[in-house]
Amino acid sequence: MSNTGQEYLDSLRDGRKVMFKGEAVDVTTHPRFTAVDHIAAGYDRALKMAKQGRPVKTRTFPRSVAELRQDIEDMQELEGAQRVTRLAMLGLHTAAGRMAKILPEYQHRIEAFVEYCDANDVRVVPAITDAKGHRALGPMKQQDPDAYLRIVDRNSQGIVITGAKLHVTNAALTHELLVMPTKQMKPGEEDWSVACAVPVNSEGVVILAAVPGAEAEDAAYYPYSSRAQHPYCFVVFDEVFVPWERVFLCGETEPTGAFAHSLGLWLRLDTAAVQSDESDMLVGLAQLLAEANGLDKIPHIKDKIAELILDATVVRAGFEAAVSAAKITEDGFCAPDELYTNMAKYFATMNMPKAYAFVQDIGGGSLLTAPLPEELESPLTGPYVEKYMMARPDISGAERTRLFHAARDIAADANSARRQVTYMHGGGGLYAQKLVARRHYNMERAKDLARGAAGLEVKEAASSVLADYHMIV
Amino acid sequence: MSNTGQEYLDSLRDGRKVMFKGEAVDVTTHPRFTAVDHIAAGYDRALKMAKQGRPVKTRTFPRSVAELRQDIEDMQELEGAQRVTRLAMLGLHTAAGRMAKILPEYQHRIEAFVEYCDANDVRVVPAITDAKGHRALGPMKQQDPDAYLRIVDRNSQGIVITGAKLHVTNAALTHELLVMPTKQMKPGEEDWSVACAVPVNSEGVVILAAVPGAEAEDAAYYPYSSRAQHPYCFVVFDEVFVPWERVFLCGETEPTGAFAHSLGLWLRLDTAAVQSDESDMLVGLAQLLAEANGLDKIPHIKDKIAELILDATVVRAGFEAAVSAAKITEDGFCAPDELYTNMAKYFATMNMPKAYAFVQDIGGGSLLTAPLPEELESPLTGPYVEKYMMARPDISGAERTRLFHAARDIAADANSARRQVTYMHGGGGLYAQKLVARRHYNMERAKDLARGAAGLEVKEAASSVLADYHMIV
Amino acid sequence: MSNTGQEYLDSLRDGRKVMFKGEAVDVTTHPRFTAVDHIAAGYDRALKMAKQGRPVKTRTFPRSVAELRQDIEDMQELEGAQRVTRLAMLGLHTAAGRMAKILPEYQHRIEAFVEYCDANDVRVVPAITDAKGHRALGPMKQQDPDAYLRIVDRNSQGIVITGAKLHVTNAALTHELLVMPTKQMKPGEEDWSVACAVPVNSEGVVILAAVPGAEAEDAAYYPYSSRAQHPYCFVVFDEVFVPWERVFLCGETEPTGAFAHSLGLWLRLDTAAVQSDESDMLVGLAQLLAEANGLDKIPHIKDKIAELILDATVVRAGFEAAVSAAKITEDGFCAPDELYTNMAKYFATMNMPKAYAFVQDIGGGSLLTAPLPEELESPLTGPYVEKYMMARPDISGAERTRLFHAARDIAADANSARRQVTYMHGGGGLYAQKLVARRHYNMERAKDLARGAAGLEVKEAASSVLADYHMIV
Amino acid sequence: MSNTGQEYLDSLRDGRKVMFKGEAVDVTTHPRFTAVDHIAAGYDRALKMAKQGRPVKTRTFPRSVAELRQDIEDMQELEGAQRVTRLAMLGLHTAAGRMAKILPEYQHRIEAFVEYCDANDVRVVPAITDAKGHRALGPMKQQDPDAYLRIVDRNSQGIVITGAKLHVTNAALTHELLVMPTKQMKPGEEDWSVACAVPVNSEGVVILAAVPGAEAEDAAYYPYSSRAQHPYCFVVFDEVFVPWERVFLCGETEPTGAFAHSLGLWLRLDTAAVQSDESDMLVGLAQLLAEANGLDKIPHIKDKIAELILDATVVRAGFEAAVSAAKITEDGFCAPDELYTNMAKYFATMNMPKAYAFVQDIGGGSLLTAPLPEELESPLTGPYVEKYMMARPDISGAERTRLFHAARDIAADANSARRQVTYMHGGGGLYAQKLVARRHYNMERAKDLARGAAGLEVKEAASSVLADYHMIV
């Protein structure tokens, strides 16, 4: 059952405590919280799709490569907060099987929560990254034990938690916080081994929202980034009570990594899907600028665009291979290949600075210095802009000016920098991607290939004699 | 003689036509033109230095390596618009000798202009980049002949010019526009072969000013970039009359490249000096973040910082070598080495994305998601920020929060992207730096070294037998 | 029907003219032509496989993704010259459909030739690259018209060709030269538009063979590269007669590119398959060295190996995507995806220097300075080597010494450099890969994605609003 | 006093124990030890220079920047083993001042040894790198305590040492081994804290020589690397007695690092000088190939060469800055700047693979497949080679063929790989260069620049307000 956008807006007036610049605010009316309208529009769109017989999937999980491929594709149509909710559900489902082995009750609670979210059409956001204090020290060695969110009390009704989760995008605009450990815990760290679901309006939850930039206020100058300004939320849990039916892990250190890990796989796959299109978009942007400037036949420009094409193809190949090499889990569930998924996100992220630099290079200094969009409208300045910003007859000066502003907004302004940081640290961070890649790589086979090449004894199977390939034809 | 800041402000109310968002504005009072106050403060500072017996150099030119080194060092103390004026004078002086060979009168006019600027303590900005139209075509092949600024009339009093100059930072806040050709002109392009000085308030000069971003309005969130928001100016010359005494080139195609080239050398040297410090600043920023996060002993973080150190050292070595290998020109003037100067700027610019990426990596997601500075002041939110943003006892949560905002502003927001574009396209562009490098490189010597190594006949001198160096000890 | 190795050796004594260091040689007995034994062994292996009911495919062509995948896999078992023959047949088959449209007779001749090769179990090698003379000039502008191989006479029996083909690996050891144009010819270049099959022992064919290095003579020092030393052959065609039934193109300029292009796709796919394993082999080699040196737990070493893993995964993902996205041609033939195939080869080649550098770094100076393998055998020196080359109890000093020599041979000696050049210039060269990538990329879709992001009018379909993805969780 | 080449040869027949492939050899007559002739020729050259009034400096040490510059320049004329001797003396001299503070006797012994070397015109080579065993463990934790060379006995006459030094290039062809610790030792590692000079023919010294490749045997195919094939020597010290007068450190752990560090600075400076010329040579080689192929006007080729020029300029700038920023030590001795020296060597080494790749790219497949040099001489094959290898009238086919072989030998064969490893691991290794860079970098100044930029409190001095530099003109 889908709610309307208005029902969503009403639901946010639930007593939640959202702070902005030191003061409590109503997110449904405050002018800087423009993202609330996007999310509301997403509700209405989903409603419309349901009426058209294309309901948004929320509780089905892919069971074959074809279903997986379709699922990811469908997901790309969803509004951001809804997509995150969907990913959270997939992650929970993946983790549930694992948790059943620890305590069957955990799995039942997770399934009940998934059912609740589905039935009530709520938005859920994972809350993972702790304050962490001194990064080189574990939870127990911190000066302040709350540096990692922890269980401070337990009773027959449930548990009480204290701590903070730092990078919870859109927390102020969602309904449920899906709290999970930020790292694999060790013996002795039982109090920090906790996963649970917490309604945003719970007593003790305080959200410090940071809405980046003011781009939404100047849509002409920021045609791209003005469309979505999700608030970054710093969520404080100040002795928050969580009833047992929403506690998914409590004190067992061993499976602590499973939650973030399960979610991470889905987040990274979705990111890789987005990045595939985004990389293509940057290719297209470079080409549009080259054409608008009359540079599209210049050899070194063509060469740069070809390089962007090859880079974009790496991302897409990684995504394609992740899906086509997906494996069916014990639970009959189709999960993407970890190695390819991570590879795709890793290279998409690593190559962004180059893509931005090429767009900046091809665009030229006018990316920054183009006359403001408002000059196009004024009779005093419009004709000058049209006259001097036209480079070729088939593209008007006005269109070229708008293209420069868009290109700046996408690739040479706050958005480009912010997006780099988002991809770099989201979904586990680049360092985590390297760890995951190592873990899922078949090193024994690689070593055997090397032993075979070296003429040393091979452990498993005969490996190709690669030396045989010295050919130029 | 130095003017006061107030005299400077008064001088800007001279009838100049500055447009912002389609309307004429008074730059001395409009809230978005904050740079005017920086420039005014620069006047007052210069006045103070003069009173202390340290007058700002304006008309002396370096005659030895020691003087050159001192000059560049002194220049780093100047406010931006004053520094650009100084560089314009150095560039003009370098070009003057060349122009004397074409027409002695040109040199006299240049010298008179330099004297005028000195005597009246005005601010001058070069206006170089034309609209250019279709980039693959020259001035004569453009649909609109004004795509490159040109002489549309000549008479006994002077000339009349029409066209636009696109990237004239701060034009709206200076006194004189130093117009020069954007490229080497060819025979047939006589009308586009023009260099001259034009007062900003001349009839027919219209400036479309684009003040980037709104950072100056939120100094807490933008502690770095709020300090200086120079307007990018798109300057239209609509049949502007220029008297002969301000015309420095008129119709001779051969020396057209000399102006931009002479200026370019000084601009790039100054840029390299700035980039040397800026590269060190980014090293320092990475280190401060590593310490604030408790990551400064982690091997891969140390490794990244060492890499930034080595990169910064490349820039400084280039700058040092450019000065220590400076040569005395025919005119007895000490000019920096072109090859080293270009190398320094080239690598500083090319390596910026990496430096920003490392700062982003070391800083972590909190670069974006840190609570807003205002939260620190509020009794409702301040204690939470202090508690959860503290990573180690010797750095308070408030200090760390401020450091994150500064690091974002410097390396992960509009400023970082903008600065990349500025360095990429300023002072001639990266492509021009490659051309200059090729031109000033001793290729004959390199080829002889290669011939010697190859055992082929050597043209000039015996070259080292490099094969002799196979040693590990 | 497969021949025996001996039959193959006998077949080479057919009057062919092979020159080595200025003298005619018998390749079956000359000590430097060790590759002849590999090829002979390949015949015997194929015979054995046929007897086991696994005949080597020679004339079947893949008709589905599954068949394509199996074909490529089977091909990896083949000896090099046999694999090249197989690729040549696939390339011919791909080109045949195209040629039928020009002249049906061409297709029949091609099919007859394929049948002949199959029936007689001969080895075929493509001969593509011409002498080319001055690279910036086309065939007609060369001082010597033979700089590109051309038709110098035609009569009722056939044609006469003159020219040279430069990089024909193993030509001296094969039966048929598959001559094809090195580039797309233009109108006026009819005489240079020729494709045909020429027996190696034809009158007028002279082969100048260059066997690289002398590694085969010291198998202990070169455990890897001593196994295969294919001769690079410079093949002169000095008025060679070709009967019409072996002429596949004669004077039509338009389809000249089709041959090399069709072959190139298959060559690059095969190369990508080899490079996938080779990249894994280099990962394994780095890991074995890290373990042998006791460095496998050092963070920066682990990090380097993770980077190699990610790079190797790019190659494999490209290969996987090329196969899984293969398309069925009009002829009902399954051809790999061009874009992914090229991407795989491009990155495998571009990243080789890094892989070698990491192996060199992890291996250490002992890659060069390790005691010679013979020292292990001598009672005078063996004990010293064992004592001082042992780093950890589970790997003997002798094993570590052998590993160093193999690693040097693979990644820090003639082989590594040679292999880089081979991949760089084989299968069309890196520059060609960029061209192919551009041609097969869906630029219109990319431009539409950019227009959608820029808020400009979209040509085809609604594209995703990517701005919606600003999330860190 | 200089000896003659013959005297040098005679001096090597001194009972030294040199093993090659398991057998004792006489290095003055064995055919693989061709380097002995180079070293002998170096003696004769030095003698000639002395007669011309230009004696080779051996005991003077630079006391000013000008002397330092001259010294390095003079050094480039010396034969390799003589240059290493000179560097060893400079390193010893630098260390001597430091050792005087530990024990004045150490300094006297060092000075006496320097005097001895000078008086007898001997060749000295540093012996630094130990066997090291398990790299992650220190000397005391090794299974075999001899994994690091150590003092196994001491008496009134001197000490007895046991161990091995692994990468002692040319040890078999020099007179004295300058033994020093490979790392900074810690308390408890007194037995491994030893530095001394050991004549090569000492009882117990056994040298296992590995002469790389067989290039010297085929000078036509290897015109570059055939000239110098220095043996890599693995030197075993099997209870070698060293009299006190040659013991420069014995049991003090604290100054252990000083020897290798002092030597390292000079080695790296010399390497940077060589690499400056070598980088230029590679630029010249790329240009010669571009010209020989008719590619020198192609944009992407010009661009690659410009990139090589810029890279070469980084190395030279580092070297120039290292010399011009040299500092006078307490002892009145002029030592190059550590930071710039390390930067130069670091980037020269890191960029070599790129330079080789560009040479390979510009050269083309003919680097490998060019007809052998002997074909040029034969009347049967010479005319074909001349005809088909000529690309433009001003460069004969023979010259182009020779250029390809030289370019392969330099940049695409064993030499290029070997040289990369040599630079990577010589003079301390790239990792050491990063450590040294960190140690000599002024981090406090960099942090202050960052604090200034961030608007935080500055510790030392006011730092530039860099934000002021947003300009494009």
Image (spheres, coloured by chain):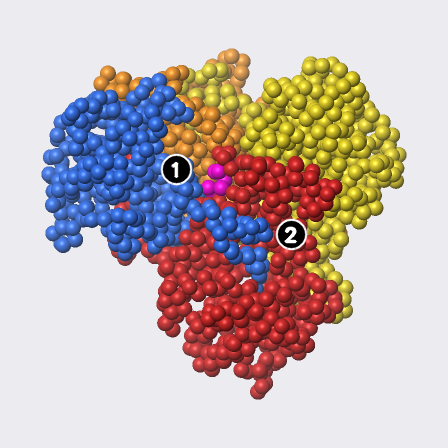
Chain colours: A red, B yellow, C blue, D orange
Viewer-proximal residue among C423 and D450? C423
Quarter of the image where one finds residue C384: top left
Q: Nearer the viewer, mark 2 or mark 1?
A: 2
Q: Chain of mark 2?
A: A
Quarter of the image where one finds residue A467: top left
Quadrant for the C terminus of chain D, please: top right
Q: Give the magenta-colored segment's residue range.
A: A301-307
Where is residue C243? Give x, y as percent: 16, 29
Residue at point 48% right, 45% down?
A: A308
Is residue A266 found left or right of B117 in the rendered image?
left
Badges 2 and 1, same chain: no
Where is residue D442? Give x, y as percent: 66, 43
Residue at point 58% right, 50% down?
A: C456
**What is the three-letter code of the residue carrying label 1?**
Ala
In this figure, which residue is indicated by the disc labeled 1?
C432
Where is residue C163? Give x, y as percent: 27, 24
Vertical arrangement, residue A122 with respect to residue C362, above or below: below
Residue A222's label in the rendered image is 2
Q: Is residue D437 visible?
A: no
Q: Secondary structure at mark 2?
A: loop
Q: Chain of mark 1?
A: C
Is residue C19 found left or right of B427 in the rendered image?
left
Residue at point 68% right, 69% down?
A: A27
Is residue B81 found left or right of B143 in the rendered image?
right
Q: Secondary structure at mark 1?
A: helix
Residue at point 48% right, 64% down?
A: A75
Residue B337's label in the rendered image is none
Viewer-proximal residue among A464 and A138? A464
Viewer-proximal residue among C179 and D356? C179
